[in-house]
């Protein structure tokens, strides 16, 4: 057969050689006649039984994943379980059965399509990918309606490369992953849960491969290149030999990097760079620590909110924050207050008006918290209480003015006073900081730095707002690189001003873990970088190979400030 190269989006790095195994999902149900009056109650019972079977299946999948990949990845299934308690999902399906007389299968498919459309309309990659969870739960409900309790294992030959329209986390739990050489899908995103799971399990994965199922044939030899985002069908001997060599080298490199984990991240000329981790759940703190993180540079608290049918209460938040602090001990844990609103709606929080014309410039981040005092106070109470368990720092997102900081500080002072009057243990000396994500904050850094204990530069939004470019828009990304002179000058000036003021400054955006950007950031003055835990080993090695003087000269030239 002739070699053919299919291209998609890299979702999990690495390379695998194997044979194609196609996996096709269940086709939509044929249209079914509406229920008769006497059939409604039995149909509701049938659906509720399916919910309970699915609940048990998800619990089993969670346990299996925890054993294979760890607790952090297993938490994926916690999000799925919530759908089974969500009135907007299960409740709506029951209403479709009870009030519109729809068959259970039809009701599930209709409601899932509606939920999927809602998520697809969001601008946030993470939230948009939650549509996958809804489809996965719906798929399991349909299986439960069809087949009852037992979940069927998916038989695989050794060195299988799975190709599918889309793949869900529940599918992977039914596979012997030791037999998987790779995954390729026509749909999906890098933020989908199955992509997260694939990265945790070390399975090379490519998503968004157009025409995949039309071109790949069962049993066909292929190379799955998760680094380049390619699936090479019927490769020749030279390509197979080259892929085999890369696999051997990658294996040796992983082993070598892991052995350097205890070495400090110091440049060739002796500049120390602190490496911290970005996490989204308290369970990830243990993984970060294991991989050599010197602290948590960004704990996104949105995960506590977005997958919940109701806002989390103080105790639930306190427990999550305390757990992360206890894992990290004396190491700093920077916890960002809720960064939602605008394009990221939350249950229980509404602006009470029409949809915003431009949510990225709307009521989001700290603005949302200030506009909704009760949930903000609840989060601050949980944070100040949890701070007694470790070294928690509180960080506010999307700060644009000095007035924003003053308003946030007043809330913190009020909450600390409440806790003191109630006799509840807490810390009232918790460091307070802000994210530098918009040009106004970067330009006014000399004023803002007086009001806070630390700053962290969120490069994703800073690039977007400085260049007025949606960084996810492929039509614009190439024209407006993240290394634009305006962005670099803002980063440099924020770091220099913070350093002059004796305040801590870090970088936690995507650039912080980018191998191309790391030397440049060091040249701009960065001495603390925070990134996904999986990138820490490679970043440490890169820093140890970097000369900060050379990096500074390069940064000055890129800023047009060469002396």
Image (spheres, rainbow, N blue to C red):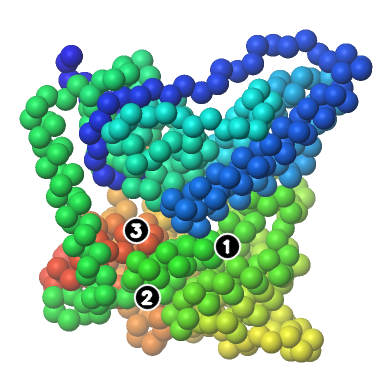
* Mark positioned earlier in the residue sequence (3 or 2): 2
Residue at position x 18%, y 44% from top? 247
Give the answer, above or below, for where 550 lies relative to 219: below
Horizontal placement of 332 versus 179: left or right? right
Q: Position of residue 389 (x, y in %)?
A: 57, 82
Q: Is residue 135 above or below residue 36?
A: below
Q: Nearer the viewer, residue 442 or 551?
A: 551
**Element assignment for label 3:** helix
- Residue ID at (35%, 85%): 500
Q: Which residue is mark 3?
A: 534
Residue 45 horizontal side relative to residue 107, left or right? right
Q: Quadrant of the C terminus?
A: bottom left
- Res. 472 image quadrant: top left
At label 3, counting other C-alpha atoms closer than 10 Å, the crowd grade (few under 14, some 14-19, many 20 or more) is: some
Residue 114 drawn above or below residue 363: above
Residue of label 1: 301
Q: Are marks 2 and 1 in contact (CB under 8 Å)?
A: no
In front of the other: 529 or 199: 199
Measured as percent of width and height from the top left, residue 180 is found at 34, 37
Tell me the distance, in whole angstroms, between the alpha carbons under discs 3 and 1: 20 Å
Identify the secondary structure beneath mark 2: loop
> Which residue is rendered at x = 49% and y = 44% of the image?
193
Q: Which sits earlier in the primary sequence, circle 3 or circle 1?
A: 1
Real-space CA distance between mark 3 and mark 2, rounded to the nearest whole angstrom? 14 Å
Q: Quadrant of the N terminus?
A: top left
* Residue linked to disc 2: 294
Query: At numbered mark 1, what does the secondary structure look like: helix, strand or loop?
Result: loop
Q: Determine the CA span between mark 2 and mark 1.
A: 20 Å
- Eye-nearest disc, 2 or 1: 2
Residue in the image at 30% along x and 72% along y: 526
């Amino acid at each position: 057969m002739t070699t053919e190269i299919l291209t998609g989006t890299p979702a999990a790095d690495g390379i695998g050689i194997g044979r194609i195994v196609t996996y096709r999902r269940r086709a939509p149900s044929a249209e079914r006649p509406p229920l008769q009056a006497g059939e409604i109650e039995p149909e509701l019972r049938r659906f509720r039984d399916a919910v309970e079977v699915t609940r048990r299946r998800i619990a089993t999948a969670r346990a299996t994943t925890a054993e294979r990949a760890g607790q952090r990845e297993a938490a994926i299934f916690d999000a799925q379980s919530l759908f089974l308690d969500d009135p907007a999902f299960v409740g709506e399906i029951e209403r479709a059965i009870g009030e519109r007389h729809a068959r259970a299968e039809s009701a599930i498919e209709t409601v899932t399509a509606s939920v999927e459309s809602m998520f697809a309309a969001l601008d946030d990659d993470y939230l948009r990918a939650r549509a996958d969870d809804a489809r996965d739960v719906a798929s399991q409900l349909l299986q439960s309606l069809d087949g009852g309790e037992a979940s069927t294992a998916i038989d695989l030959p050794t060195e299988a490369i799975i190709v599918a329209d889309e793949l869900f986390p529940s599918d992977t739990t039914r596979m012997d992953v030791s037999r998987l050489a790779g995954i390729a899908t026509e749909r999906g995103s890098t933020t989908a849960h199955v992509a997260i799971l694939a990265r945790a399990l070390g399975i090379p994965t490519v998503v968004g491969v157009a025409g995949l199922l039309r071109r790949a044939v069962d049993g066909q030899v292929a190379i799955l290149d998760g680094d380049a985002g390619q699936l090479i069908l019927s490769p020749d001997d030279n390509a197979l030999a080259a892929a085999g060599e890369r696999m051997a080298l990658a294996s040796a490199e992983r082993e070598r990097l892991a052995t350097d984990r205890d070495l400090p991240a110091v440049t060739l000329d002796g500049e120390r760079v602190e490496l911290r981790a970005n996490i989204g759940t308290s369970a990830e703190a243990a993984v970060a620590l294991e991989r050599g993180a010197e602290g948590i540079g960004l704990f996104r608290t949105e995960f506590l909110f977005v997958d919940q049918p109701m806002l989390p209460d103080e105790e639930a938040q306190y427990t999550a924050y305390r757990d992360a602090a206890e894992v990290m001990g004396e190491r700093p844990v920077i916890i960002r207050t809720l960064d939602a609103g605008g394009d990221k709606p939350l249950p229980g929080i509404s602006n009470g008006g029409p949809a915003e014309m431009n949510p990225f410039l709307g009521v989001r981040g700290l603005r949302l918290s200030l506009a909704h005092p009760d949930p903000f106070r609840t989060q601050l109470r949980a944070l100040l209480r949890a701070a007694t368990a470790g070294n928690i720092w509180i960080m506010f997102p999307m700060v644009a003015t000095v007035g924003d900081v003053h308003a946030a500080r007043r809330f913190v002072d009020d909450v600390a006073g409440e806790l003191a009057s109630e006799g509840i243990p807490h810390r009232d000396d918790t460091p307070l900081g802000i994210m530098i994500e918009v040009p106004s904050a970067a330009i006014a850094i000399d004023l803002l730095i007086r009001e806070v204990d630390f700053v962290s530069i969120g490069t994703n939004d800073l690039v977007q707002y400085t260049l007025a470019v949606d960084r996810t828009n492929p039509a614009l990304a190439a024209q407006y690189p993240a290394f634009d002179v305006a962005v670099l000058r803002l980063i440099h000036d924020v770091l220099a001003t913070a350093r002059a003021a004796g305040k801590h400054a870090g970088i936690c955006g995507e650039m912080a873990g980018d191998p191309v950007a790391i030397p440049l950031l060091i040249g701009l003055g960065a001495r603390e970088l925070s990134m996904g835990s999986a990138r820490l080993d490679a970043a440490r090695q890169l820093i140890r190979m970097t000369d900060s003087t050379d990096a500074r000269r390069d940064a000055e030239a890129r800023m047009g400030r060469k002396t």
